[in-house]
């Protein structure tokens, strides 16, 4: 099955979609995994990126307009997923904080707010900790908010999460409301 046929079958849905997704996986998965690992992802990370890529290809199949080869379109999505992953990993690495034994004790003793607020961290540390907690409970919502914080336009975020512009605006609004309990206590740091 050619890539153009795969995309068309995904758009059709039903059994043709299932067969097309299977053909897509069989035809591209190994090459994508090798590419992701070659670009610096671990084996497990490459599998996660592959899954994200396949989900986005399926979600966005209807947006393929045939302006170029379908294989190039598929691989562009895979490359974008890899870049998103590498960007998230780099941002997390920048925020990593070494925690000595004394800090672990302080972390264990506190339960009211994220640890960053209890060991003299900045507002940014507190918000980052709240975002991490939010992300562990609502990863899709945290991902959408992270895209917005990175400066992506609403339409670009919509493409990444598979929503229309209007639906993306509403979704981001809901995400901002849902993150509030995770970062509300950080406002205390503003008054110090």
Image (cartoon, rainbow, N blue to C red):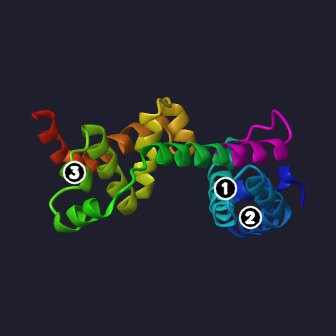
Estimate the spatial distance between the alpha carbons at disc 1 and disc 2, rounded to whole Å. Answer: 8 Å
Task: State if disc 2 and disc 1 touch (CB < 8 Å).
Answer: yes
Q: Position of residue 188 (x, y in %)?
A: 12, 41
Q: Position of residue 147 (x, y in %)?
A: 47, 39
Estimate the spatial distance between the alpha carbons at disc 3 and disc 1, rounded to whole Å. Answer: 45 Å
Above or below, comparing residue 123 to residue 105 in the picture: above
Q: Position of residue 191 (x, y in %)?
A: 10, 34
Q: Which numbered tag is attached to residue 58? A: 1
Q: Which numbered tag is attached to residue 119? A: 3
Estimate the spatial distance between the alpha carbons at disc 3 and disc 2, rounded to whole Å. Answer: 49 Å
The 10 Å Cα crowd at callout 3, few under 14, some 14 to 19, many 20 or more, is few
Furthest residue to the right? 2
Residue 162 makes an appearance in the image: no
The 10 Å Cα crowd at callout 1, few under 14, some 14 to 19, many 20 or more, is many
Out of 13 and 101, give the one closest to the viewer: 101
Task: Point out the tag, 3 or 1, that comes first from the N-terminus.
Answer: 1
Tell me, yes or no, whether the highlighted magenta stretch contains residue 79.
yes
Task: Point out the tag, 3 or 2, that comes first from the N-terminus.
Answer: 2
Residue hosting label 2: 21
Element assignment for label 2: helix
Tell me, yes or no, whether the highlighted magenta stretch contains residue 89.
no
Please state the extent of the stretch shown in magenta in the rendering: 64-80
Residue located at (24% from left, 38% from top) = 123
């Amino acid at each position: 099955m050619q890539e153009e046929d795969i995309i068309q079958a995904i758009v059709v849905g039903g059994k043709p979609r299932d067969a097309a997704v299977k053909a897509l996986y069989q035809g591209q998965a190994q090459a994508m995994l090798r590419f992701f690992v070659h670009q610096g992802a671990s084996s497990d990370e490459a599998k996660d990126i592959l899954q994200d890529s396949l989900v986005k290809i399926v979600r966005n199949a209807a947006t393929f307009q045939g302006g170029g080869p379908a294989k190039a379109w598929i691989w562009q999505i895979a490359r974008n997923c890899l870049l998103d992953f590498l960007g998230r990993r780099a941002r997390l690495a920048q925020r990593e904080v070494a925690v000595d034994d004394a800090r672990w004790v302080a972390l264990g003793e506190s339960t009211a707010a994220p640890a960053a607020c209890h060991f003299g961290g900045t507002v940014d540390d507190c918000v980052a900790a709240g975002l991490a907690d939010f992300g562990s409970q609502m990863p899709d919502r945290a991902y959408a908010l992270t895209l917005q914080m990175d400066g992506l336009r609403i339409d670009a975020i919509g493409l990444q999460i598979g929503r229309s512009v209007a639906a993306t605006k509403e979704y981001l609004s809901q995400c901002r409301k849902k993150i509030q309990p995770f970062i509300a206590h950080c406002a205390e740091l503003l008054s110090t």
